[in-house]
Image: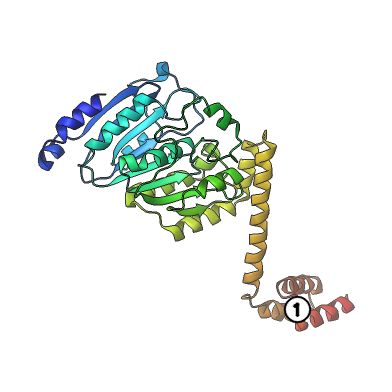
């Protein structure tokens, strides 16, 4: 626990001396959790990240250049970072050694005035569970799991819930406890379990992304730059521009390639394909409503004028123009009259 010893000595210094000791980097191994940290500037936020599910790293996979989930992103934003990477496939940050480390760490963080937390899924659970302990100010959670305590979330029937029962879900930090933290929770409302977990975070601003699913932080969403841009804005400004976020997600969902990619990635899961179909149908309805709304503002008179001007020389082209005008304004009597005249001539 090298970090604890260093922080204990460092926190006793005055602020100028503390800043002079930076930057510093290091790492520790706490049972089945690897932690890597870098402190660069006292005036910058301190970011905590916990890794999501989907990896099966072992101790022998660690090396000097290994970066836990979120660590490199924080480095690029030039903020202070303490990043936790779980080892093994089923690991919910329930190690007693890890918890003791976090309890001791929480008493040594006074020099950092701004503290942030960022996590996805399982990592979101850890941010929520340890938020009050670490006195986080702002958090960003993507489809977090609030707990695996079956008594609290009996509707979470994922296979991971049963596997997670090997850990203690009665002791300290087994459930979300945000303390005074504010921030954002981002999830897919068509995913019932994610939606129900999200309801357990009423303190946070809820941002919904139809079709995102659970755990879709793989290449097919990264290709659109979705997660990265949201996280970067949060780290830089400690807030998200909600209007920009909604514009970004709407633009993303308007891409058919978005659904094609998600469908391919979830080809082996009929459940996820069903959820994606639901989200896609919602999008189709939105598109129809969007087109209908904008049709009201389109002036069809230029189409009618051009069709009238050329109906003698190019009657087929004039007919096509009038048919377009009718689609835009199906109740326009003038267009209907012109169409009937032209169809009678042809």
Q: Residue at x 28, y 45 (%)?
A: 45
Q: Residue at x 35, y 27 (%)?
A: 98
Residue 221 falls left or right of residue 49: right
- Residues 129 and 300: in front is 129
Q: In the image, is residue 48 above or below residue 289?
A: above
Quadrant holding the C terminus: bottom right
Residue 235 falls left or right of residue 202: left
- Residues 340 and 85: in front is 85
Identify the image quadrant of residue 308: bottom right
Q: In the image, is residue 334 above or below residue 330?
A: below
- Residues 331 and 346: in front is 331
- Residues 345 and 125: in front is 125
Q: Residue at x 40, y 29 (%)?
A: 85
Identify the image quadrant of residue 102: top left
**x%, y% of residue 265?**
62, 36
Q: Residue at x 58, y 43 (%)?
A: 193
Dot 1 crowding, Cα within 10 Å, few <14, some 14–19, many 20+: few
Quadrant holding the N terminus: top left
SS of the residue at dot 1? loop
**x%, y% of residue 297?**
61, 76
Q: In the image, is residue 240 above or below residue 292?
A: above
Colouring mode (rainbow / by chain / secondary structure / one colour): rainbow
**x%, y% of residue 114?**
27, 47
Label 1 sits on residue: 331
**x%, y% of residue 27?**
29, 25
- Count every numbered label the image shows and give the total: 1
Residue 208 falls left or right of residue 239: right
């Amino acid at each position: 626990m090298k970090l604890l010893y260093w922080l204990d000595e460092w926190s006793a210094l005055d602020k100028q001396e503390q800043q002079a000791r930076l930057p510093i980097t290091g790492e520790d191994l706490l049972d089945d959790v690897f932690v890597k940290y870098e402190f660069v500037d006292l005036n910058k936020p301190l970011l905590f990240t916990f890794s999501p599910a989907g990896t099966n790293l072992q101790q022998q996979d660690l090396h000097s250049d290994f970066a836990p989930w979120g660590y490199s992103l924080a480095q690029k934003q030039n903020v202070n970072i303490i990043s936790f990477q779980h080892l093994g496939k089923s690991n919910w940050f329930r190690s007693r050694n890890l918890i003791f480390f976090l309890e001791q760490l929480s008493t040594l963080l006074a020099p950092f005035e701004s503290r942030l937390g960022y996590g996805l899924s399982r990592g979101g659970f850890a941010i929520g569970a340890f938020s009050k302990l670490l006195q986080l100010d702002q958090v960003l959670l993507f489809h977090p799991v609030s707990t695996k305590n079956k008594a609290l979330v009996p509707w979470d029937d994922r296979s991971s819930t049963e596997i997670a029962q090997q850990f203690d879900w009665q002791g300290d930090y087994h459930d979300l406890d945000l303390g005074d933290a504010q921030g954002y929770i981002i999830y897919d409302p068509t995913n019932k379990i994610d939606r129900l977990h999200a309801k357990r975070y009423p303190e946070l601003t809820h941002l919904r992304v139809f079709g995102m699913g659970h755990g879709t932080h793989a290449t097919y969403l990264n290709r659109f730059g979705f997660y990265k841009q949201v996280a970067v804005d949060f780290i830089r400004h400690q807030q998200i521009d909600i209007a920009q976020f909604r514009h970004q997600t709407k633009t993303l969902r308007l891409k058919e390639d978005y659904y094609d990619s998600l469908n391919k990635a979830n080809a082996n899961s009929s459940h996820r394909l069903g959820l994606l179909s639901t989200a896609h149908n919602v999008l189709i309805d939105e598109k129809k409503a969007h087109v209908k709304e904008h049709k009201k503002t389109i002036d069809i008179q230029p189409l009618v004028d051009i069709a009238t001007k050329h109906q003698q020389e190019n009657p087929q082209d004039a007919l096509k123009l009038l048919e377009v005008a009718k689609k835009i304004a199906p109740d326009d009597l003038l267009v209907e009259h012109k169409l009937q005249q032209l169809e009678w001539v042809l």
